[in-house]
Amino acid sequence: LAERSPLIQQPIFSSTNFENIFTWKSWGEPLPGTVYDVQYKKYGDAWQNKSECQNITRRSCNLTLETENFTECYYARVRATVPNCCVSEWAESSRFYPRENTIIGSPDVKYTPSVNSIKFYVQPPATPLRDKDNQILTVVDIFSQIGTTFEYELTIHCQKTKQEWVKVNNNNEFEISDLYPNTEYNGTIHIRYSDKISKPYVFRAKTLSDTTW
Amino acid sequence: SLKQLHFGHCMVSVDMYEMRKGFGDIKEMTQSQDQHTSIRLLHGSHSLQNTKSEDRCCFFHYLLKFYLVNVFNQCTEGNNFHQRRVSRIANNFLSIKKELTLCDTVTTCSCGKEANQRYEQILNQFQRMDSHSAAVKALGELDILLDWIDKT
Amino acid sequence: MKHFLVWSPVTVPGAAVKYSVEFQGEYERDYANDSWIPIGECTGISVTQCDITEDISATVPYDLRVRAGVGTQASHWATLSSFFNRVTTSLIPPMLTVTADGYHLLVELERLGPAFEFWIYYWKKGQGHKVYRKVVKDSSTTLHMDTMEAGTEYCVKAQTYVEAINRSSNFSQVQCVRAEGKAIL
């Protein structure tokens, strides 16, 4: 099969909450029958075939398990084959660091308004990874394992005074007290870790009316 | 962002922010120039934090000198931005090495078998490559070294 | 930490004088054959100052030099009389805005960059013996310090600290604000 100019563009890892997907684009409309083969490796090792991603037609491959050691660095590459025609060059990703390159999704938050306060309970996003006891690990579990410091950052805006301020909390359960009754507060909650920040959870809450008078 | 490393009775402070920022600005370009991705100089199994504590000071000293003598001066071509970022990292390495040298008077940096063996493996692998490719690879592995320092 | 190189202008009647700046860290002297590195942003400039903060990024002695040029002609280099080390930098007190939002004590800080920490001290007016301290990293928003007792006045002051050179500034002016409501006596 004669080799032709690369049929593949932008071979990259896209990673959210340590779910690491290797994706690529086709240069123009793929020729009929085009299939792809994917290989991966830890930096410094030899290439290995990803068995579930051989002769595939889709343009993505889940390499989460193969790249689960989040303190290591990895490469992936893909090649296109057009039957009875040609094979492309390998298109290789840049060096991929799960720990640095993964995007942290928004946390899930439960909040309970009272007359003068709002109580927040923040649930960090889960990852596809599990611990020794097969329990699902959250992103915060992983940060803790690698010694990364993290905080829960609340930004709150008071509709009544139009003031907005930030409160940084170290644990995932906290209460904002001394608020005005029957008043709307909105804002965001992020998880901040080393010099990075998660996607925001956006909330809008109203304190209860004060019926004691 | 200042990491304190303790070697025996003495302490060395490492400005992690300056080095991570300096390296972060040139990381992608440097690593993309490394065509030999099946070769690795700084192996996880021979990391600084996995080195016996009594050998750590010496191994760290070796690594600093390795980068100062063999790596940074091979990476000064490229554009002005790249040059200035390599200078930022190199001068921070030198600042650490000067503190470590002071350390030597307080706590002898004993160079045991493990420190020598580990360093020799790195140097042998480095010398098996052509000097420019080896320097580019070593520079591209700085984040591995910075992780080692962070975990020590 | 902001570092600037400044110099006196050279005047050549009828000609546009341009200046170029280069720096050299201790690494360049000891390991890189005494080489000099141009500062791109300060090459061929007409002002007589250059922001060298990005390049003075280690706690080692640096040398700096500047020369003037007119067309293809260039002057000799003018070099510092003694090396510059960033530990000699002077830190000025931070600018601070203290406000109250109902019972909430809020502080707004100026953005000085990631090398800075802010040490913020606050106390109930008249109870200077009981001072609380919060350490805040680089921040560009209004920060919640604490919840105040109704009708009570609280005072705040702050200083900056740069870990890399282990130095801190003097304190800012003290600012006091009063929480909403009536004080409970």
Image (cartoon, coloured by chain):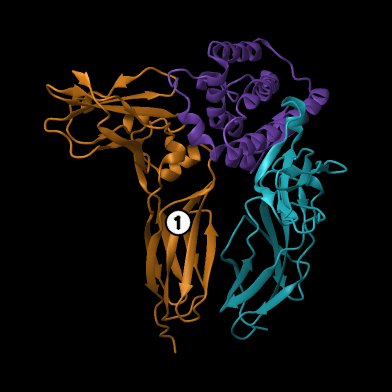
Q: Hey, which quadrant is residue A4 in on the image?
A: top left
Image height check: is B116 above or below C183? above
Residue ranking furthest to the bottom = A213
Please name the amino acid that badge 1 sits on: His
Colour in which the image shows chain B: purple
Between residue A83 and residue A54, name the one nearer to us: A83
Residue ranking furthest to the right = C81
Between residue C50 and residue C62, name the one nearer to us: C50
Residue at 52 percent across and 19 percent down: it is B45
Spot the orange chain and give its letter: A
Position of A54 compared to C13: left or right?
A: left
The residue where tag 1 is placed is: A190
Q: Position of residue C113 (x, y in %)?
A: 63, 54
Position of C7 compared to C53: left or right?
A: right
Location of the C terminus of chain A by quadrant is: bottom left
Q: Is residue A135 visible?
A: no
Q: Is residue C105 visible?
A: yes
Spot the cyan chain and give its letter: C
Image height check: is A76 above or below A28? above
Residue at 78 percent across and 42 percent down: it is C64
Residue at 21 percent across and 25 percent down: it is A54
- Disc 1: CA contacts within 10 A as few (<14), some (14-19) or many (>=20): many
Q: Secondary structure at mark 1?
A: strand
Location of the N terminus of chain A by quadrant is: top left
Between residue B20 and residue C26, name the one nearer to us: C26
Q: Hey, which quadrant is residue A77 in on the image?
A: top left
Residue ranking furthest to the front = C14
Q: Position of residue B92 (x, y in %)?
A: 69, 35
Q: Hey, which quadrant is residue B79 in on the image?
A: top right
